[in-house]
Amino acid sequence: MTRHLDPGFTEADEAFRSELRAFIEAELDPAVRDAVGRGASVTKAQHQAWQRKLAAKGWLAPNWPKEYGGAGWNSVRRFIFDEETALMDTPRGNVPAIDLVGPLICTFGTEEQKARLLPGILSSEDWWCQGFSEPGAGSDLASLRTRGLRDGDDWIVTGTKLWTSHAQNANWMFALVRTSEHPKKQGGISYLVFPMDSPGVSVTPIITLGGVHAVNQVFLDEVRVPGANLIGAEGDAWRMTGYVLGLERLVGAGIGHSQRLLKHLRDVLKTGPLAEDRAFRDRVAALHTDVLALKYTAHRVLAAEMAGEPAGTVVSVLKLKGAAVQQDLAEAIMEAAGPVAAVSPRAEPLDLPADEDALLWTATTYLDRRKLSIYGGSSEIQRNIIARRILKI
Ligand SMILES: Cc1cc2nc3c(=O)[nH]c(=O)nc-3n(C[C@H](O)[C@H](O)[C@H](O)COP(=O)(O)OP(=O)(O)OC[C@H]3O[C@@H](n4cnc5c(N)ncnc54)[C@H](O)[C@@H]3O)c2cc1C
């Protein structure tokens, strides 16, 4: 992989980057952009409005083939899209639908399932949540215990899913369900999809450290799922999950997000109490170097991928460092902002100058970034993978 250093951005790629920037500038509601930039909440309706603009342009589903309404982009275009949309503070939309279950259905679904389930994602009518994790089955996902028992053509599903993002707004779930006994715990797991208003589904909110309602616990009590809602072959979900997660190799690095946080740090530093502090400025320079190192490592992976080589375990390095760099930047922003960063945005409205008002969500963002080293494979799990597969220890 080290032989490939230049991802080979062509003139057409750079023209695409400019077109994308102009599109966001012209089409994204400035109030929504401002909210995303501050780390404030964005409503489902605001996410949907932006998704519909992307869909009209054919850009909503970067990982789907064109024949099913996707963008049909190569890895370079997807990288540019991820980088620029993060840099320009666009809302992320319904990631479980667009990046996970959509590609899953495109690849493993029947023609009937594609015709029935994909249009609702592209029109933003349908909002999906991902039911993988359970109590006692997060990092060790294959230990999941939610069961599906056969009843004629249907499945009767019972269990509980935990940390389910979007469940409070979703009308569909795609879930990993144990449908048969198998000598290996990764075997016997199937993909079932069902509407969230099915009898037996209930959602309990979980408020996270940042005071945000983003995750939930979902209880499944004898939920009847028609046989037509099994995606792919029964018991084959583990292999299919590996395929779908593999489509998102570079997203964990969060290059655009780190670059945006770095810019924000520099802006905050200009007017904050540490503006002239030499030691702090050295720290900002070191963070800048980290962001550049991350970016060039991602370019290296992208170049290898374009040359037809699998990205391999270096993806774990990107995920590990990508999370750490964003968390370090969020912490530095807290310090650079000074005492105003500790003021909660949920308190009574305060009469603050505009530059201080803009900092009110700083603590929320800082706390929210803690999740980066947990989901998508925790930092400890990434270190285990690096130790075993790269360092061979
Ligand atoms: C904000 C957020 C959103 C999420 N959204 C979703 C979602 O939409 N759908 C979904 O299914 N899941 C979701 N998750 C769940 C996420 O995938 C899990 O939290 C993650 O896999 C970790 O599992 P766990 O929480 O059970 O922690 P555990 O696996 O119990 O880990 C606890 C601690 O032990 C460490 N650890 C575990 N195993 C090892 C090991 N072998 N070696 C060394 N250290 C280890 C971990 O790194 C961690 O620090 C979300 C999580 C968060 C934080």
Image (tube, grey):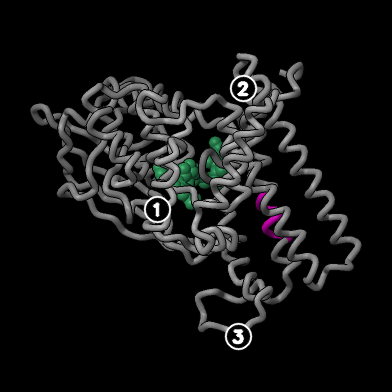
Q: Tell me, for residue 57, which label it has, or none.
A: none
Task: Tell me residue 18's x, y (percent).
Answer: 63, 40
Query: Mark 2 or mark 1, which is nearer the start of the sequence?
Result: 1
At horizontal 77% and vertical 40% (from top left) the residue drawn is 292
Q: Amino acid at mark 1?
A: Ala
Task: Tell me residue 30's x, y (percent).
Answer: 53, 61
Q: Which residues are magenta?
A: 326-332
Task: Tell me residue 365's x, y (percent).
Answer: 59, 61
Residue 160 visible to an observer of this rendering: no
Q: Judge the density around disc 3: few (<14), some (14-19), many (≥20) Cα neighbours within 10 Å.
A: few
Q: Judge the density around disc 1: few (<14), some (14-19), many (≥20) Cα neighbours within 10 Å.
A: some
Q: For numbered disc 2, what is the local secondary structure?
A: loop
Q: Nearer the viewer, residue 218 or 248?
A: 248
* Residue occupied by mark 1: 49
Q: CA distance from mark 1 to mark 2?
A: 35 Å
* Residue occupied by mark 2: 311
Task: Tell me residue 371's x, y (percent).
Answer: 55, 51
Q: Residue furthest top?
A: 308
Q: Main secondary structure of the magenta part?
A: helix
At horizontal 36% and vertical 34% (from top left) the residue drawn is 101
Residue 36 visible to an observer of this rendering: yes
Q: Tell me, for residue 351, which label it has, or none.
A: 3
